[in-house]
Image (cartoon, coloured by chain):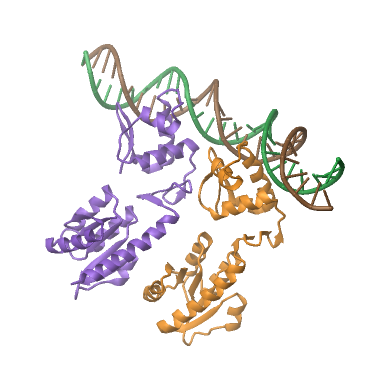
Chain colours: A orange, B purple, C green, D brown
Amino acid sequence: MKILIVDDEVMIRNVLREYVEFEGNEAYEAEDGMQAVKMCRENDYDLILMDVMMPYLDGYSAVKEIKKVKDVPVIMLSARGEEYDKLFAFEIGVDDYVTKPFSPKEVMARINAVTKRHTAKEQKNEILKFEGLEIDMAGRNVYVDGVKAELTPKEYELLFYLVRNKGIALTREKLLYDVWGFDFYGDDRTVDTHIKMLRGNLKEYRKFIVTLRGLGYKFEL
Amino acid sequence: MKILIVDDEVMIRNVLREYVEFEGNEAYEAEDGMQAVKMCRENDYDLILMDVMMPYLDGYSAVKEIKKVKDVPVIMLSARGEEYDKLFAFEIGVDDYVTKPFSPKEVMARINAVTKRHTAKEQKNEILKFEGLEIDMAGRNVYVDGVKAELTPKEYELLFYLVRNKGIALTREKLLYDVWGFDFYGDDRTVDTHIKMLRGNLKEYRKFIVTLRGLGYKFEL
DNA sequence: GTGTAATTTCACGTATTTTTCACGATTTTT
DNA sequence: AAAAATCGTGAAAAATACGTGAAATTACAC
């Protein structure tokens, strides 16, 4: 479990990190909302522990921004006495919240509850979200700005493979071998044609599929 | 696992070396911060055990200096009673700390925790860092002071090959054979032109590519 | 079988990349 | 000190890779 801890106070982060790692999870840290949003755009986390009060970009705004791009469970941390707007929090998709100062037991219990809930949900349909591009591998669905993209079988396979290997350079040979199969003895340029079709179907999100001249392609944010 | 032990006391170094080697790791030693920084510039270590109090250059300053160039996990060693500034340590990127006197169990547990954490992180995207030059071979990205350098295919290949063989003298013939391919029957000086282009793109880090007159080139820090 | 959708091949145009080569600067050898 | 070798560089020529559209082939449902 990869858990992102967002708080401007180092000591709080360290305490949370200890709880998180004690339970066998990986902890990542961000000092403010800005940084958290940036990290979420580039990486996938299973849970976010987000402080409400932070410099640059507050917790609410950060969550709102993150939820636009990725569907991650969030637990908000608020100091006692801080005005905590439950209704608003619920609207932007906060899963739970704890008030500082918190006990280890309390935090761990909530983390476990949320992650368990989420893994149960994810086993059914894990939907990856890259800006307005949503990819549901299990359900074999791709949505571009909310509308379903009608892809051909090869296009699905190709896209899913690229996404599973996002950030990694893939040669045409490797793509042919892994997506088409080891027994494909055809033209390299077949890949290009499918990339073309795929890009056409992804509309503006064609930008995620970058050409690596002299090599092949990769999926990158 | 190559582990660098930095402490001015011989006895401490010996004890740590025993722990480290008992777990099947390679131990290296430095007597002070200066020496540690120098060794890190020239070699790659998987972990550094760094004492806080040392002559010439203290542990904090040494870590700060090392982190500028390489991303290595660090465990700080501090004597009980010594004022240990956790906040500062965290800021400069210290992964963990133990207070002397320490038990073998404690040290080993922390070493294992940190190395495990770090290898897990690296498996995703191994990004090499040489001062302000970052190289992500898997993602085919090169960053010069944070900004992406747009290299041509041959420039990527050449740079990656040089880096993979860093510190080793490479003749034009070897470069042509390994980077261009065994079936290249062209001019030797082709290499020079590509080195020129590469240097231009690496800006100030052109210095890493050194010319070996009468021989060829090599990548060196 | 037939028709439709999907896949693959291929050729063209364009933009980029690679290579060659010659000149001048620098270093080494005679 | 002159001659020879080596290297950095710029520019031009040659080669290559990619996007695209269209045609050919294959797969599959009915």
Does residue A52 appear in the picture of this structure? no
- Left-right relation of A162 to B54: right
Does residue A55 appear in the picture of this structure? yes
Q: Nearer the viewer, residue B1 or A134?
A: B1
Percent coordinates x, y for residue B162 in the rendering: 37, 39
Percent coordinates x, y for residue D10 in the rendering: 46, 28
- At 39% from the left and 39% from the top, the residue drawn is B161
Q: Nearer the viewer, residue B111 or D6?
A: B111
From this view, report whether residue A18 is shown above or below residue B180: below
Q: Residue furthest bottom?
A: A81
In which image quadrant can residue B120 be found? bottom left
In which image quadrant can residue B18 be found? bottom left
- Left-right relation of B134 to B38: right
Percent coordinates x, y for residue C19 in the rendering: 48, 25
Quarter of the image that includes the C terminus of chain A: bottom right
Percent coordinates x, y for residue B201 in the rendering: 44, 40
From this view, report whether residue C9 is shown above or below residue B138: above
- Left-right relation of B89 to A84: left
- At 41% from the left and 39% from the top, the residue drawn is B159
In which image quadrant can residue A124 be found? bottom right
- At 48% from the left and 82% from the top, the residue drawn is A98
From this view, report whether residue A170 is shown above or below residue A134: above
Q: Nearer the viewer, residue B20 or A85?
A: B20
From this view, report whether residue A21 is shown above or below residue B120: below
Number of numbered discs visible in the structure rendering:
0
